[in-house]
Image: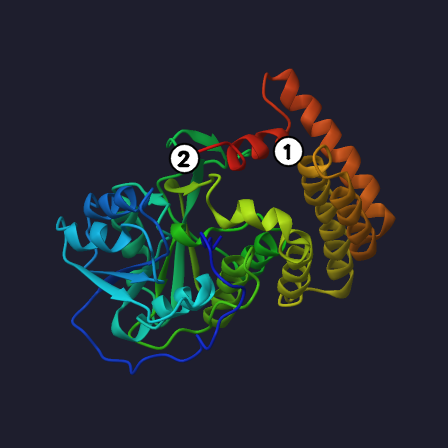
């Protein structure tokens, strides 16, 4: 997920791209950042430790007021360009600035200033894209880490394999609709020196999930590298924590993404109806966790979330969501783990 440390909601004219100039660049890594001093050094270092290093690294600073500029300018492990926006474009606007590099490179990787990739990330993903004509994307699985680099997730781990596979478009879109999403730092885009197929839209909590689904449906070529090569950081300072206070981002945008991406799936009417039912149930479970996260300290807000859940998904969403979360949390506690809401609160609301 795209995660600002502090930025206004909106793209602010980010659909404007600079003139596309072709460089002798094969792989470009781009980092959008605002006040990233806490984790940016580790992100820069993980790119320098790649077995296949990026040919070009560009940091787009969104008007940081901390030591971010000094950190980038003093980083010399690999050549790095520092570009400072004249005004804060918002996280999505800055992400779209990064996408403006698409026409200058064959492969483009956007990584947030607090996420990591393991040393073989590019070595594993780039070869899987080289034999594909035109735009495409490749992705790896991701671990979740906390502010101290401890692995805390994902809750469900997928089987790994040394063999990559082409993912059918309907399968990829189905997972994105269910918010079992591929995460942006674990993705390499094949742009082939062409403008981006799409841009980030004004849905801060789910912008990257929608973007990747849109890119995939436009190119139709998706490759999965089933290894855990990306580390997505959950911590008290990211926007996922702040979005808890924004009902539109916290709840509604997820449902809008699910409905929209599901509409891009080519399937018979009966299958579409079953998918819609499944999405309502998943909405219920995800929303119940959100209610559990806030109900103790903010009971009125929890009731507001419940009312919106009922409005969006109906009573079935409420009942199935409550039951499934209670059963899952009971199983987690029997295994010596906290409930999901408790775990998320501990990760995203702890003190620095």
| Relative side of 206 to 198, left or right | right
* Residue 22 picture location, percent across and down: 21, 78
Looking at the picture, tell me which residue is in the foreground, 124 or 79.
Answer: 79
* Residue under pointer 2: 147
Q: Does residue 336 lie above or below 70 as drawn?
A: above
| Residue ranking furthest to the bottom | 19
Looking at the picture, tell me which residue is in the foreground, 295 or 170.
Answer: 295
* Residue 123 picture location, percent across and down: 25, 49
Is disc 1 surrounded by few (<14), some (14 to 19) or many (20+) residues within 10 Å? some
* Residue 218 picture location, percent across and down: 49, 72
| Relative side of 307 to 100, left or right | right
What residue sits 63% from the left and 23% below the top? 332
| Residue ranking furthest to the front | 65
Quadrant showing the C terminus? top left
* Residue 72 picture location, percent across and down: 22, 53
* Residue under pointer 1: 341
What residue sits 68% from the left and 43% below the top? 286
């Amino acid at each position: 997920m795209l995660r600002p440390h502090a930025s206004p909601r909106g793209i602010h004219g980010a659909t404007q791209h600079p003139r596309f100039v072709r460089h002798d660049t094969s792989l470009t890594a781009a980092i959008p950042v605002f006040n990233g001093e806490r984790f940016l050094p580790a992100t820069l270092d993980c790119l320098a430790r790649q077995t296949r290093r990026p040919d070009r690294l560009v940091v787009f600073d969104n008007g940081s007021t901390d030591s971010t500029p000094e950190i980038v300018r003093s980083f010399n492990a690999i050549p790095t360009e520092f570009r400072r926006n004249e005004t804060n474009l918002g996280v999505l606007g800055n992400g779209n600035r990064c996408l403006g590099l698409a026409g200058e490179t064959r492969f483009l990787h956007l990584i947030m200033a607090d996420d990591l990739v393991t040393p073989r990330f590019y070595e594993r993903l780039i070869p899987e894209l080289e034999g594909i004509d035109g735009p495409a994307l490749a992705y790896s699985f991701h671990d979740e880490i906390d502010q101290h680099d401890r692995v805390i997730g994902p809750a469900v781990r997928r089987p790994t394999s040394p063999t990559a596979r082409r993912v059918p478009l309907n399968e990829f879109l189905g997972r994105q609709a269910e918010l079992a999403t591929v995460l942006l730092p674990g993705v390499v885009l094949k742009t082939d020196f062409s403008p981006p197929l799409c841009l980030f839209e004004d849905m801060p909590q789910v912008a990257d999930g929608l973007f990747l689904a849109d890119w995939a449906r436009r190119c139709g070529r998706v490759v999965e590298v089933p290894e855990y090569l990306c580390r997505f950081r959950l911590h008290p300072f990211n926007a996922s924590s702040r979005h808890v206070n924004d009902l539109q981002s916290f709840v509604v945008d997820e449902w809008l993404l699910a409905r929209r991406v599901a509409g891009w799936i080519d399937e018979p009417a009966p299958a579409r109806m079953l998918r819609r039912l499944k999405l309502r149930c998943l909405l219920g479970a995800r929303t119940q966790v959100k209610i559990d996260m806030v109900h103790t300290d903010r009971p009125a807000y929890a009731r507001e979330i419940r009312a919106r859940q009922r409005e969006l998904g109906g009573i079935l969403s409420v009942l199935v969501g409550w039951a499934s979360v209670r059963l899952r949390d009971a199983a987690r506690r029997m295994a010596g783990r906290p409930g999901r809401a408790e775990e998320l609160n501990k990760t995203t609301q702890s003190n620095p």
